[in-house]
Amino acid sequence: MKAIQILKKLNRDTVAEVYYAGEYARDVVRRKKSNHVQVLVRNMSLKHITRYLKQHVKDLYINKEKTCIKFGMGSTEVDICLPRKGNNYGPYYSLKEDAKGRGFTINSMYIPIGPKKKLVDHYRGRSCIRTRKIKTIGKAELAIKRNPDLMIKAISLAAELNYRIDNNLFYAIKANFEVLEKVPMEDIRDELITILLSHKPSRYLKILYDSGLMNLILPELSICAGVAQNKKYHKYDVFDHCIIACDNAEPDLMLRLAALFHDMGKPQTREEVVKAGVNRVTFYNHEVVGAKLAKKALKRLKFGKKTADAVSNLVYNHMYNYEHGRWSEAAVRRFIRKAHITASDLEDLENLPVFLLRKADRAANGLELSEVSSRQLALQKRIRRVYEKSKALHVTDLAIDGATLMETFNLRPGPTVGHVLNYLLSIVIEDQKLNKRDILIEESSKYLSKALK
């Protein structure tokens, strides 16, 4: 028996009144499919609902507060809740009172599961769906002061559905953006992820900036607004360039974050210089500064270390400037190592993260250049040739290992061993003839002698 059939049977065979509710009811009205079914049940206790469901469902989960039951069948997940109460001992709310706690009008509708499927819509949620608008129940300012998380949720919901923010709600957010500080950073991170993975994140990132929320969430990005760039290479200021690059990146969280952050270091490194009588704007080493800022911002937003490291690495490496006549084979091998290119990447180099980031970067310059340059295509061909020729060396390819270093030089396990191995790898990449045990031990001795001075 399918989940929906069980719910219909519960409504038909017992005294329970069963309603589709919340986001599921919203999606039914929008004629969108969802595998997450949210249900509200009236006139029946959770205990009796549980007893009934056990006849048809093997595994039930009841939350600690004993106000909600969850179960899954196939790809469908079901959440069953009772109406809210005014307090622990008071009566259950009516549908209209219960709907007040659902934040937005489009999430406040109920649809009876029984034969009479007339929509229960006390706060004109269907009207907001027709006009594609996110609006709070009641006065926006009072709603966000009671629940500050509604500010960021409104924008992420608009991004998810491609809706617009009600004007009254936007101005209420702008006047009270500081109360976002009361919202746990993990919750802000989750809503930001929804925005970044939406169809057009720039539209909603701009709302975050215009409302003032960006100053609290990503101040490093906020200060990029108004930072002019060299018109020869960029039509937009740094902020607009970054959010448009985010639009053009593949809908992958790591890539979208890297695109958003890739030029974050430009405000701190911007200089205006005059060369041959021409005014120029430079941002030397902005990728180094940006990589540090990205890691710091992602840590603050409670992203995992793996994500922070990957994004920071992409930001750091996005400014490679390949020129065939100036890049030696050793330089190509160093790039292969920095970009962590493996044999499995060779057949699909176009989709290497750092190349996809460069593609999004070029698409966001506003100058209508091709997304992939001829130099980029030449680099990809050369990487394949050099890799096949040298099999791109790694530390594990060295003629000696960490154990040999510790035994030969009486070293303890620790970062020093890693530093020596990385140094040896760098010289072997330059000249693979040096990859011999005796030569590497001699080079290790020289390196350690200098390090100890």
Image (cartoon, rainbow, N blue to C red):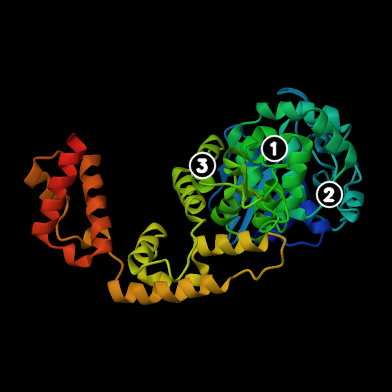
Dot 2 amino acid type: Arg
Q: Which badge, 3 or 1, comes first in the chain's sequence?
A: 1
Say whether residue 368 is left or right of residue 184.
right
Viewer-side residue, 124 vs 18: 124
Element on which disc 2 rests: strand
- Mark 1: few, some, or many residues within 10 Å (few <14, many ≥20)? some
- Residue beneath disc 1: 214
- Mark 2: few, some, or many residues within 10 Å (few <14, many ≥20)? many
The relative height of residue 333 versus residue 407 in the rendered view (above or below) is: below
Q: Is residue 93 visible?
A: no
| Position of the N terminus by quadrant | bottom right
Q: Which badge, 3 or 2, comes first in the chain's sequence?
A: 2
Instruction: In the rendered structure, find residue 289 and report the number of the disc placed on it.
Output: 3
Q: Residue at x 52, y 51 (%)?
A: 315
Instruction: In the rendered structure, find residue 119 and report the number of the disc placed on it.
Output: none
Q: Which badge, 2 or 1, comes first in the chain's sequence?
A: 2
Mark 2 vs 1: CB contact within 8 A: no
C-alpha gap between disc 3 and disc 1? 20 Å
User: Quadrant location of residue 62?
Assistant: top right
Whole-percent x, y for residue 362 in the image: 63, 62
The relative height of residue 307 versus residue 220 in the rendered view (above or below) is: below
- Mark 3: few, some, or many residues within 10 Å (few <14, many ≥20)? some
C-alpha gap between disc 2 and disc 1? 18 Å
Whole-percent x, y for residue 4 in the image: 70, 59
Q: Residue at x 54, y 34 (%)?
A: 300
Dot 3 amino acid type: Val
Number of the front mark, 2 or 1 = 1
Viewer-side residue, 336 vs 277: 277
- Residue beneath disc 2: 164
Q: Residue at x 20, y 44 (%)?
A: 417
